[in-house]
Amino acid sequence: MKIPLLGMSLDELSKVVSEAGLPKFTAKQVADWIYKKKVTEIDGMTNLSKSARALLSEKYEVGVVMPVEKHVSADGTKKYIFPYDGKRFTEAVMIPDGDRRTLCVSSQAGCKMGCRFCMTGRQGFGGNMSVSRILSQYYGVDEKDGLTNTVFMGMGEPLDNYENVRKAIEVLVSDWGFAWSPKRITLSSIGVLPALKRFLDETKVHLAISLHDPFAGERLSLMPVQNKYPIGEVVALIRKYDFTGQRRVSFEYTMFSGVNDSLRHADAIVSMLRGIECRVNLIRFHQIPDSPLSPSPDKVMEMFRNRLSASGLTATIRASRGEDILAACGLLAGKAAQKENGLV
Ligand code: SF4
């Protein structure tokens, strides 16, 4: 098996070229080919000599993994299915919105966290995606040259694969990499505390925290993670950081009918987040099979939003996208896996 160059930092590429006996400046050329020109073969690096390319190809490959399926929604949302290990699949979703092209990427094949409302959680955990697999999602989509934003909000808990996600973010924001502003990137997490602290200290990208219920006991029944990393401690950590400048924090709140959509919940959110410069995104739940949870009616969501807004919180109802292609996290990859394993 060859080693992927995709995901290597400029320092790591410098080591690769020096070990191969190539001139130092080759590292910058290789980085340009992979991250700026997005070549997928070492042979495509045409300003490297033939012998340099042959030397590199002995041990290395670019390492892009391409999608095996694409589904296009009536509203323009596209879901791409990537192979993982022959049995499992991961997903990336491209969401168009005016001039924006946002890519929602996965960080793990499946997930350990077991949130009750999530199809990915039901599939269990299949492994951490490597840096090259995380970044492959930016190469395998039709919009690869026109992406404006990205969210780590697909399959998996990104802070449960922090080291690889941090390296992928480094490639996205570095001058030698994609050279994106950190303002174009948002990481969404249920609040894995030790890694969350590192993420806040080591990167400048935006943060979205999956809140979903302000009451500890109720949240635990939706999200087992509450046991290990209580939301109160997550919010206490966030309070220590400055979100009044370029960096933003938001709280994601999926609304389940009769479960977390009362005004009592809205008032508890207001108390919990008082003093934090943030936004609350109210998300319409995509019904998933065999679940007692159902979406809150629009009217209830509006009342909830109005209650938050009246208390001074910025709250928005997030438009639901790509419902006709099962854009809810994990649904399509689950189907692809069933097909692969002869279950449908
Ligand atoms: Fe994992 Fe996120 Fe699904 Fe929870 S919602 S099970 S953290 S993928």
Image (spheres, rainbow, N blue to C red):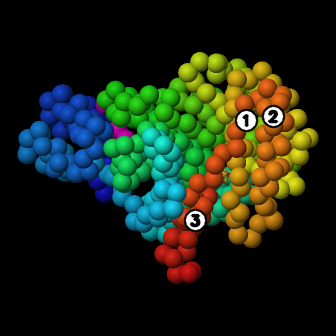
The quarter holding residue 84 reads bottom left
Q: Main secondary structure of the magenta part?
A: loop
Q: Is residue 221 visible?
A: no
Question: Picture coordinates of residue 229 (x, y %)?
Answer: 75, 39
Kindly identify which numbered label has been placed on residue 308.
2
Looking at the image, tell me whether mark 3 or mark 1 is earlier in sequence order. 1
Magenta stretch encompasses residue 9:
yes
Looking at the image, tell me whether mark 2 or mark 1 is earlier in sequence order. 2
The Cα–Cα distance between marks 3 and 2, rounded to whole angstroms, is 30 Å
Q: Tags 2 and 1 in contact by the CB under 8 Å rule? A: yes
Question: Picture coordinates of residue 59 (x, y %)?
Answer: 23, 49
Kindly identify which numbered label has been placed on residue 27.
none
**Is the shortest distance between ligand 1 and the CB of mark 1 under 8 Å?**
no
The residue under label 3 is 324
Q: Residue furthest left?
A: 50
Kindly identify which numbered label has been placed on residue 315.
1
The quarter holding residue 115 reads bottom right
Element at badge 2?
helix
Element at badge 3?
helix
Question: Picture coordinates of residue 106 (x, y %)?
Answer: 52, 50
The Cα–Cα distance between marks 2 and 1, rounded to whole angstroms, is 6 Å
Q: Where does the magenta region start and end?
A: 7-11
Q: Amino acid at mark 3?
A: Asp
Q: Is residue 284 visible?
A: yes
Query: Horizontally, is 110 left or right of 282 in the view?
Result: left
Looking at the image, tell me whether mark 3 or mark 2 is earlier in sequence order. 2
Residue occupying image coordinates x 81% and y 50%: 299
Binning the other alpha carbons within 10 Å of mark 3 as few (below 14), some (14 to 19) or many (20 upward) gives few
